[in-house]
Amino acid sequence: MSHEERSTIEARLAEEEYYSPNPEFIGQANVSDRSVYDRFDEFPDGFEEYAELLDWDEHWTDVLDASNPPFYDWFVGGKLNASYNCIDRHLDAHRDKTAIIWEGEPGDSRRLAYQDLYREVNEFAAMFRDAGIGADDVVTFHLPVIPELPIGMLAAARIGAPHSVVFGGFTAAALANRLDDANSRYLVTIDGYYRRGKFLDHKQKADEAVEQASVDVDTVFVLQREKELHPETKIVEGRDVVVEDVRSQYRGAHVEPVPRASDDILFLMYTSGTTGKPKGAQHGTGGYLSYVAGTSKYLFDIHSTDTYWCLADIGWITGHSYMVYGPLLLGATSMMYEGAPDHPHKGYIWELAEKHAVDIFHTSPTAVRMFMKWGETHLEPYDFEFKLLVSVGEPIQPEVWRWYYDHVGRGDTVIIDTWWQTETGGVVMSNLPALADMKPGSVGHPMPGIQATVLDDDGNEIEPGTGTAGNLVLTRPWPGILQTLYGDDERYISEYWEKFSDLESRNMDDWIYRTGDGAVEAADGYFRILGRLDDVMNVSGHRLGSMELESTIVEVPAVAEAAVVARDDPVKGQVPDAYVVLKEGVEPSDDLREAVVASVAEGIGKFARPAHVEFVDALPYTKSGKIMRRLLSDISNDRELSDTTTLEDPSVPEQIRRQVQGA
Ligand code: WT7
């Protein structure tokens, strides 16, 4: 972090302000008294509070086995099934209650009662089982936000098969990588889906991915959204199963939920890291579900009577933890929307919120900045009222926070700014909604049972209140923590633990989880998150690794080298800028610029496209041969160049800067 960034932090700290939760919220909150958290004074036993929210087939014998850090086992000896906990156990009391409200982009809508969800999940589970899927076979889902996605996830979980959901916006190449890494022989896809009124072909990506992947994909389950309108979807004999065609065989099926050991895998979620290869965060069953149920109840304040709407995609961890598992574990109603927030009009989100009387609303700062840009007039016609608002995924600037509070919260609704990661499984830092004041721009404190602190690069703790930024670390395990990176324990250690832990020690106190984020802890104990310290950026709340983009760009035949850095963006938070060196004798051109952008759109997905491509003669290399992206980031963000003394050729960044500024 540069000196300049540090001084801006100090300046920002000067404008501290607090907002108190309104008494009406406190009056109805699941936790309005700190004593609920008294149990958390005991570590790790406090987390039993969360595990007790679930139904276990076998009770655990030990809360935590930490004998082999950083591989932690929670609720050891316990057995449970995720699908049973999300559905079956609610049937007696809530059979007819709505589990999922789904709104499709073209205006189609579905409402599934818990009984309906039970029926559909069982039918899917029977279909999966008949296809030969057994416990521990990874089932990959490549779908938009449609009810069959949570149905399929819960069906897989019912038979003990881990799911790996790949965000629908990822391309065939990205899907193929993930199929291979997970050694997944089963894929669920769909003919197509709608985005801003257009029907997009999706099945083609599955066909290409299966072609490209090294793993032999046995079965591709094909959902059909528009059989009549788009009958052209290609079906591969012997491999593809058209779900609608086989469905009737499974009417009324009941599949016994398979009891899973607490540390059996529930799912994989691929995320970006500092190398080009995506990493499969592996989440277990008992610890993850306990943590998600606990945070959903106590932090998101979900009651079974609530209609809760998280405007995210199930293809990311937010959707897993807080669209599917959290609300369903608590027997609440989870609302899902398939489409773009401005389709068919810019007030549509608020129209839907009114229509379904949503009372908890969850979104990202990027979405709030977009709503803010469109203007509050789009909200005014609608009669919605939320009791709680959630922000997740990126730092929310105080002025954006205030807009959220004033216009979506209408000046008195509690906002929680929740900090977490794919790896943490659930929220690990936030202001507790009824117990702590809100502080715009800060994520609040570590959640009960969680220990967080800020370290300098040498591993020394930074005193709170000094305004000095450092590495945000977590110094104790929690039940939602990933188990490992799928099939790669070594990378798990090197990405998260190596930097600050004593790798020889068998004592968990010597193991420190590096989050990769920079943070400042204020004198009042509130943490402010500054963003990633590693070569990972956050575009509209989606995590992207520089190396991932670079390895796609260098596949363009004319490209010799590429470096990608994040540029701050008023709406998306950050956007990728690409600096590209062409091969000898190749001249820069608009066509090549388009080819670079297209390589990312095709290799990763449209959401990752570089905002700007700059062709340069050379990249700034250190004497030891590493690209110094920090200097390119200085240029992209129009900052003074930081230290260049370790460069092989210190004149490179200045040349690039002059070129960018058109001098
Ligand atoms: C990264 C994790 C957690 C679900 C969505 C993203 C950033 C997340 C916040 C927040 C500031 C945040 C961090 C983190 N981040 N929440 N409230 N304030 N930054 O999950 O894709 O795993 O990304 O998102 O940089 O490391 P993810």
Image (cartoon, rainbow, N blue to C red):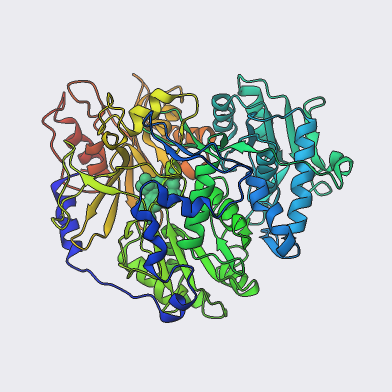
On screen, 176 above or below 50? above
Q: Is 663 left or right of 398, judged from the image as shown? A: left
Quarter of the N terminus within the rendering: top left
Q: Residue at x 17, y 55 (%)?
A: 464
Residue 190 in the image: state x and y as whole percent: 71, 42
On screen, 462 above or below 108? above
Q: Is residue 29 visible?
A: yes
Q: Is residue 539 visible?
A: no
Residue 577 in the image: state x and y as whole percent: 35, 41
Q: Is 146 left or right of 171, judged from the image as shown? A: right
Residue 504 in the image: state x and y as whole percent: 27, 23
Q: Residue at x 32, y 32 (%)?
A: 497
Quarter of the C terminus within the rendering: top left
Q: Give 565 or 189, whichever is nearer the viewer.
A: 189
- Which of the 4 quarters of the picture holds residue 390? bottom left
Q: Is 171 left or right of 201, judged from the image as shown? A: left
> Residue lying farthest left?
645
Q: Residue at x 38, y 64 (%)?
A: 432
Q: Give 361 or 473, whichever is nearer the viewer.
A: 473
Q: How many tags in the picture? A: 0
Residue 315 in the image: state x and y as whole percent: 56, 45
Q: Give 196 or 240, whichever is nearer the viewer.
A: 240
Q: Give 505 or 559, whichever is nearer the viewer.
A: 505
On screen, 448 above or below 70? below
Q: Residue at x 54, y 47 (%)?
A: 289
> Residue lying farthest right?
249
